[in-house]
Amino acid sequence: MKLHRLELTGFGPFRETQTVDFDAFDGDGVFLISGRTGAGKSSILDGVSFALYGSVPRYEGGERRLRSDHCHLGDPTEVVLEFSAGGGRWRVARAPEYERPAKRGGGVTLEPTRAVLEERVGDEWIGRAAKPREVGIFLDEVVGLSAQQFQQVILLAQNKFSRFLLAKNDERQALLRTLFGTKRFEQYKLDLEERRREVQKRFDTAGEHARTVLEFAENLADEHGLSSDAERADDPAVRQEALADAQRRADYRVEQAATERAGAEAASEVATTAHGELVARAKRHTDLARARTDLDLIEGEQERIDIERQRLHRARVAENLRAPIDAWQRAQTAHDSASQHVETATEVWSAGGGGLSEDLDAVVAQTTGDLAVLATATRAEHDLEAATTSHAEVTRDLERISTALVEIRARRQALPDERATLTDQIAIVAEKAATAPDAREARDSAEARLQAAREAAALAERLAAAEADYAARNSASAEATVAVTNLLQRRLAGYAGELSAGLVDGEPCAVCGSTEHPHPATPDDDPVTDEMLAEAERARDEAAERARDAADTAHVIRDEHAAALSRAGGQSPDDLETALVSLKERARTAEAAIAEHDRLQTRLVAVDEREVVTARELAELTEAHTQTRERLAALGARIDDLHATVTDARAEFTTVAERVAVTTERLERARSLREARNRLDVARQALEAARIDLDARLESSGFDDAISATAALLDPAEITRIDSLVVEHSAALTAARARLLDLELETADEAAPTPDEVAAAEQAVRTADQTRTAAIAAERDAQNTARGLADLRSRAVDAFASVADTAEEAAVVTRLADTVAGRAPNTMKMDLETFVLAAELEEIVAAANLRLSEMSSGRYTLLHTDARQARNAASGLGIEIFDAYTGQARSPHSLSGGETFLASLALALGLAHVVTSRAGGIRLDTLFIDEGFGSLDADTLESALETLDELREGGRTVGVISHVESMKDRIRAQLIVESAHEGASVIRQDEDVLVDG
């Protein structure tokens, strides 16, 4: 941490604003704060402490005492400190509570405590926190030291300079933990402790599980009469050997049950075979009667089948006539259609003025020739129309070009005036546009703060919900833990009920051995199973995990909320929205000016471009005007030539196109009539040929005419159905006759059994099957009992093996956790974090002794001691003083004032050296020492000053407050605090002070 600048206004003895530039002392390394007693030297350190922590080392309470007594009622009070820490540059401004004149109604009012924290980002200060509490939280993370720790290692104030030397071990441990960041070692200890509890819990659970499995196996053996009559032992090994004897008995029962089951299965097979043979004989006689009935039914269908077979034959003959019949019908249809076309074409020809006796071929030839001649005239007529249209368009073009020439000459004359006007407007708008960057930057900054303020408001609601959720989940986790405890208690209580369920009068109890059971426990109606206990433990673990997740979520939201408040600069969304409206309007005005400036510049460029374009267009239009006049004259001459050609070709018609249309229509009518007559001749010939072919085929088919042959036709699906019906009937008849013959041969030498004989055989089968089923069930029960007992024995062996493994792991983990936590066998009672800090303290003491030995002329040496402390206090962080004159070590409290000052100074410098050299540690680049040098003799003072001089090499700056006159001559760089008029003090820091001292 390094201080850069301090401003004090209305604080302590300073009424007017006083500034201290600590960076000016970087070249000297050590500077002196001097002045008369009571002038306010220590108030400079008070200002640093107040800016960072809101308190000062000399006062225990009452911020109002910090306000300068020299202030008038309306004067402000404020301390501003600029410093570097945590990789960033910060500025904190803080004011205590004080009275000021009321703005309304007269009198005074209370100005509340105020604090603002800003961070330097680039070239500007960005707000990070805007309330005293938020600033304090933020600074805790940035500085990394509490106020008390700050006063032990950086601000070595009056009466507290020797605190670190004389501190108790616990206080020294807290400071070292913060400086060296060793809290993680404490977490290691907690993690090991958690693992120790987990392993111990698994060991207890494994033991309980092993005993429970063993009891279940013994109860199963007792339930099936496999246990011996001897009293049950307590040794698990003896009890497992007894279970092995029970297993052998269970296996013997399985062998006996298997023999009985085999005999019952053989007897059942004999009865089943006899019954099956009797049933098969009865079935054969039943099938014989059914076969005779089926044959009678099939033979009764023969007449209907014969009729269908005849239909099928006629359809297949008629199918051969289908093609000639279809051809004759198509020819008849074509002939009728051709006749109709001839009639229609004849009517059209006559309606158009044609005679029926005219030679159509001659008419077609004549009209075709006429149309060929008229084709040239048609093109001329079309060209005449196009030329007339072009003449009109060229006439309009000539008029348009003439008008455009007049307009463009007028526009060209107006361009110089427009250019002058735009130039004046651009000069006016440019001044407004120049304010745009500042306006835009102010608007964006306000929008960012407003967004942060809104985000903070939203996060406040989320934070409340997250904390409520964390409370609810934490409660649920506690309830789940209670539920597991209740189940375990019920489980233990239910063991007696499980044992009592297996008690039999006259047989010894497995627990006490008594054959009388006067008061057996009542089994629990709802026993606790392993699954229930496992489910409850799972629910407990999940609830705990959810509670941790909820805690993490609340922590994240809390950090985000604090960060958003800092970015908002402590202002509310309403205030920021009001300010943003004005800033947006200002930015819009400036941006509009920029847009207007760009638009005017574009227009000015366009004016220049238009001047060039206008000159080019004027030349082009002049050329076009001349060419258009020439085209108009040429078109007039062509129109005259085309008009003469078209007039000759029209004859009596209005247009050549009309004459061509009439001639084309006559040609089409003649062609249609000629083609219709030709198609009729062809159709008549085809009809005659089809009729002759059909008559010849009918004569040889057996059908009288085409109608009867068509009636005999069947569709393919019907033909397929009839054919399948005939084939299936024939096959069924053959199969029925063969089946009847087979059955008559099978039953020729046997009689049908009576119903009584079948019933008696069926009863014998049921009796044998019942006996077999009972034997199988007995064997299955014996096997299940043997397998269940074997499984429980195996589980018991595995469970006791797991208990042994868990016991070994628990011993190792417990020993390690106890050692790290400072418990036995750790004879020093020093936990892991203290051990690490003790090593750091050894280095601090070693670094301090390099200076203390020199300053004390070799007499005193600091000693690090790890002696055990009383009443569970932290061990390993003790400090003693070795006196070379006596050869004895003693407590630092036995030193004189001057000796205590030297030892404290050496320890403070050693602490700063070691902390700064640690990667990732807190850098201590600025130190202050308030008085104490007056207690040293001249030689010792010289040694102390030489030690301070050595600090310049490490880039560290040390401020010293002292009245010793020799130090003013010894230390070049100085701050001088002087009393000015009316008693208020001022701070002198200028070139003269730095040079002259």
Image (cartoon, rainbow, N blue to C red):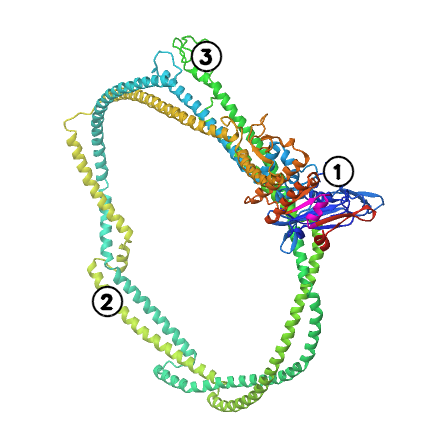
Question: What is the secondary structure assignment of the residue under circle 3?
Answer: loop
Residue 211 appears in the figure: yes
Which residue in the protein does label 2 denote? 692
* N-terminal-most mark, 2 or 1: 1
Left or right relative to 414: residue 791: left
**Looking at the rendering, which quadrant does residue 293 occupy?**
top left
Q: Residue at x 55, y 86 (%)?
A: 391
Q: Amino acid at mark 2?
A: Ile
Label 3 or label 1, whichever lies nearer to me, is: 1
Question: Whole-Å distance between the Cαs marked 2 and 1?
Answer: 140 Å
- Residue found at the very far right of the displayed protein: 106
Viewer-nearest residue: 568 or 2: 2
Rendered location of residue 763, percent (x, y)? 27, 20
Does dot 1 land on a helix, a strand or a loop?
loop
Q: Is residue 536 visible?
A: no
581 or 297, nearer to the observer: 581
The residues colored magenta run 958-973
Residue on which disc 3 sits: 520
Query: Mark 3 or mark 2: which comes first in sequence?
Result: 3
Locate residue 21, reporting x and y percent. Answer: 69, 51
